[in-house]
Amino acid sequence: MTTTELEKGTSLWHDATLRLKKNHAAMAGVVVLAVIFLACLVLPSIPDLLQDPNAQSLALKNRPPSGEHWFGTDHLGRDIFSRVLYGGRISIAVGIITTAVSVTIGVCWGALAGYAGGRTDDALMRVVDILYALPFLIIVILLGKAIEPWTVDLTNWAVDLFAGKEASVSRQNETRTWVEPITTLVPLFIAIGALSWLTVSRIVRAQVQNVAKQDFIEAARSLGLGHARILFRHILPNALGPIIVYTTLTIPGIMLFEATLSFLGLGVKPPNSSWGILIEEGANRMASNPWLLFFPSLFFASTLFALNFLGDGLRDALDPKSSKD
């Protein structure tokens, strides 16, 4: 008597996870990102662990790296180690939140255009073409300025949320110290995210049009499945690879764009900083104080490479043409 063993089915995400774990470069990127994110998000939250990143001491200015100041000090005597970690929180927040806004809009817009086709596709993509013709930087500046008056109310709401309305003045001021640099950038999040989705919409449109021609989509239609289910359950999951790769490449690009706006006085407000601001300050003093440029660049470059490796790994892992190992 023979028995037949049935192989248990696995999901796309299970197979993708297994393939991702075998990609050593991608896993190294995950580790690097985890270390950097934890250092920037957790260490500044521990009381009395780091020095005040905005505290100035001219007696300690331009000190090279030492046991007291691991990354040295700048021309105002501020501790670079603290400024890199605190600045990393802002850079990471700008990159992730703005990219999330951008990708969400782009995926919805491109998916609708690619799936609907015909006049709907033409109308939606003509809007994209018109927005492409507008001066991106100027529109971002104008939109950010239009939204900026709301940031005061948002800051007060965030302070009440995290500190509590009955908290002491010192507790509210302490909360405001780390909340305000992020809430003041909300107009920047919205402005960049609302206008940087154009490229991803074209990528998604092309992927949706390609996947929609496959036989399994025709089979889904023949079974009477609704358009929403076909689009979100069958087409978009098979177009995730390029979307994720583009997303991982967009985050550092947005960080650089934030640095440009901050240089123009429209992004991070002094004395707060981000990696882009620190790199710009370090470049101006590279000859005399090279550590001012080296350490922020090291964090930023490590994040960039880690995101690239992770994006490539996710692209390969989520490739629907890959068969089981």
Image (tube, rainbow, N blue to C red):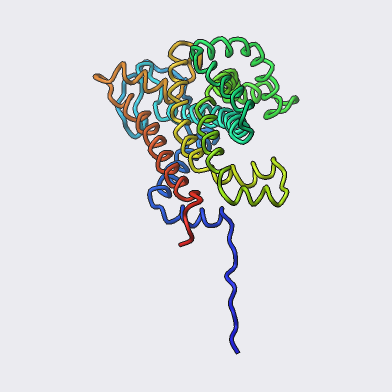
Looking at this view, is 92 or 212 the one in front? 212
Residue name at image x 59 percent, y 18 percent: 187
Residue name at image x 59 percent, y 86 percent: 2
Looking at this view, is 143 or 72 the one in front? 143
Image quadrant containing the N terminus = bottom right
Residue 267 appears at what percent x and percent y? 50, 16
Indicate left or right for 68 with 49 as reference: left
The outermost residue toward the left is: 287
Residue 214 appears at what percent x and percent y? 56, 47
* Residue 65 visible, this angle: yes
Indicate left or right for 43 with 148 as reference: left
Residue name at image x 71 percent, y 47 percent: 225
The outermost residue toward the right is: 166
For the image shown, how many numbered marks are present on the structure? 0
Residue 242 appears at what percent x and percent y? 48, 39
Image quadrant containing the C terminus = bottom left
Looking at this view, is 237 or 88 the one in front? 237
Indicate left or right for 85 with 220 as reference: left
Residue name at image x 49 percent, y 38 percent: 37
Residue 19 appears at what percent x and percent y? 46, 55
**Depicted 66 relative to depicted 146: above or below:** below
* Residue 180 visible, this angle: no
